[in-house]
Image (cartoon, rainbow, N blue to C red):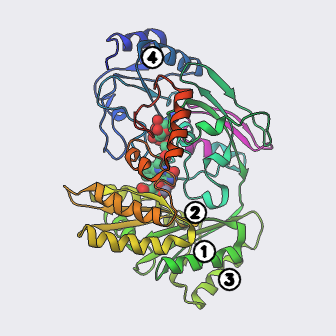
Amino acid sequence: MSIPSDLPARLAEALGPSAVITEGPDLEPYAVDWRKLFPGRPACVVRPSSTDQVVRIVHICREAGASIVPQGGNTGLAGGAVPDASGTQIVLSLTRMAAVRELDAVGMTIEAEAGCILKVAQDAAAAVGRLLPISLAAEGSATIGGVVAANAGGVNVLRYGMTRNLVLGLEVVLPDGTLANGLRRLRKDNAGYDWKQLFIGSEGTLGIVTAAVLRLVPRPKHSVTALLSVTDPDAALRLLALAQDDLGDQISAFELISGTSLQLVAKHAGLKAPIAEGEWFVLIEAASSLAGLREAAETMLGAAFEREIALDGVIAESGAQAAQLWALREHVTESEAREGKSVKHDVSVPLTAVPRFLAEAGKTLAAGVPGTRVNAFGHLGDGNIHYNVLVDEGHDAAIVNRIVHDAVAAHGGSISAEHGIGQYRVGELVRYRSGAEMTLARKLKRTLDPGGLLNPGKVLSP
Ligand code: FAD
Ligand code: MLT
Ligand code: ZN
């Protein structure tokens, strides 16, 4: 496929020359994904500053037969936001559309443009005493549009749900250039199809998100953060059950971290856990606006030691210490990347199946691909484990994937809990989703994007 050679010039004429990057070092960050697994070659990068400009770009690209790859902060871990190597795809970066348009502390909503950095939106909410409860290690670079398009998860899902649960309204430019404005701030809205759900988690393949209204929640006044070591994942689940019994809905994060993860963080980020070394750890956070949380958490943790569920542990004595404990968790991904090659798996299984899944996948992997190391960690409270396998150069990723994903399927799980399919898992999706589900997905894609303009080759094979 080819595109008119003057397409970048046409875009520059319509949007102004500063909105289009055609070559040089400025282009590079848009061409390759965060893990540097999928180097691409865009025809150009176009950076609109308004929704109207996005509409114009779609019309111009459609007319020219050029496909569009929407991109936010480019922190995605599935290669969804980068173009292929054909030199014919346009990267549409939303990063210049970064405004917080409206903040309603009483109605508890925030309206932000797609390119608004997640942390900026969180801070805006915090400034009026509210919480935007989407929290992930990439929040300093990930954008609202990317978070919505990926239906991001993160560490607070067990209490507040995935991004989908927090989206009240969306503004989307469709592949035919139509602007669908559903930027409503309503908690209840059953007037017709809830079409915005189609675009949440669609990874830029069905429409371009230009703005979103997100639900905020009251900002808890008190929080308790603790890091505990446990003998095994089964003990971690027993700790979760105890925490659910004693702290109920005040648990806002329950993260499983393996000893390997903490070793990587110590080696590459220079951060050391303030408790004895071990095989498995749990980082737990509870938050509430009512007094008495710390006492309740201390009682619960005391019971965990008494019943020998926890081996060692520390409760943060200050906000700074809590941040230090969180830093251990937040540096796992970056430290793993520094260690070398890894085959990432972002899987979920029913919560109670997590220990069996970990044991079985570990055993089959050790037998099938000797010499690999497993860096397992993740959002245990949601049954979501990042089962990342550290491998040598020249490894066979396909065998590793097969072993891990077959174990996931055997436990009724999903091959992507939160990172999405992108281009990284396109082949795997076909294998693990039923034919009827894949046909339905293709019908939806064809209906909304018959010309295959948006992000071809992502989620579904072209
Ligand atoms: P991008 O990477 O730019 O894009 C992601 C996808 O959305 C692509 O398919 C892209 O085409 C599409 N897209 C982007 N913007 C738009 C738009 N405006 N309209 C339509 N489509 C669009 N993810 C989690 O879910 N939980 C985690 O805990 C988590 N932790 C992470 C930690 C680290 C260190 C890193 C590097 C990543 C992590 N991620 C996590 C993955 C990533 O941060 C999220 O998927 C995030 O939502 C991506 O936002 P982004 O703006 O960078 O999107
Ligand atoms: C995280 O939870 O830190 C990321 O989603 C995980 C990853 O790097 O696999
Ligand atoms: Zn995660």
How far is mark 3 from mark 2, CA to CA? 24 Å
Q: Which residues are magenta?
A: 97-122
Q: Secondary structure at mark 4?
A: helix
Judging from the image, what secondary structure is the residue with disc 3 in? helix
Calculate the distance from the C-alpha at mark 3 to the C-alpha at mark 4: 61 Å
Pick whichever of labels 2 and 1 is earlier in the sequence: 1
Question: Can residue 302 be seen from the camera position used here?
Answer: yes
The span from disc 2 to disc 4 (Cα, nearest Å) is: 40 Å
Location of residue 303 in the rendering, given as x and y in whole percent from the top left corner? 64, 86
Of the image marks 4 and 1, the number of the one nearer the N terminus: 4
Is 84 a magenta residue?
A: no
First reached walking from the N terminus: tag 3 or tag 1: 1
The residue indicated by pointer 1 is: 240
> Sequence order check: which comes first, mark 2 or mark 4?
4
Q: CA distance from mark 3 to mark 1?
A: 14 Å
User: What percent of the width, then of the height, locates residue 162?
Assistant: 61, 51
Q: Residue at x 45, y 63 (%)?
A: 408
State the residue in front, 121 or 142.
142
Residue type at the position of mark 1: Leu
**Circle 3 is placed at which residue position?**
299
Please name the residue that numbered disc 2 is placed on.
382
What separation in Å lies between label 4 and label 1 (alpha carbons)? 51 Å
Say few, some or many: other residues with alpha carbon within 10 Å of mark 4 (under 14 / 14 to 19 / 20 or more).
many
Classify 183 as above or below 295: above
Residue 183 vs 368, above or below: the answer is above
Q: What's the residue type where badge 3 is placed?
A: Thr
Q: Are marks 3 and 4 in contact (CB under 8 Å)?
A: no
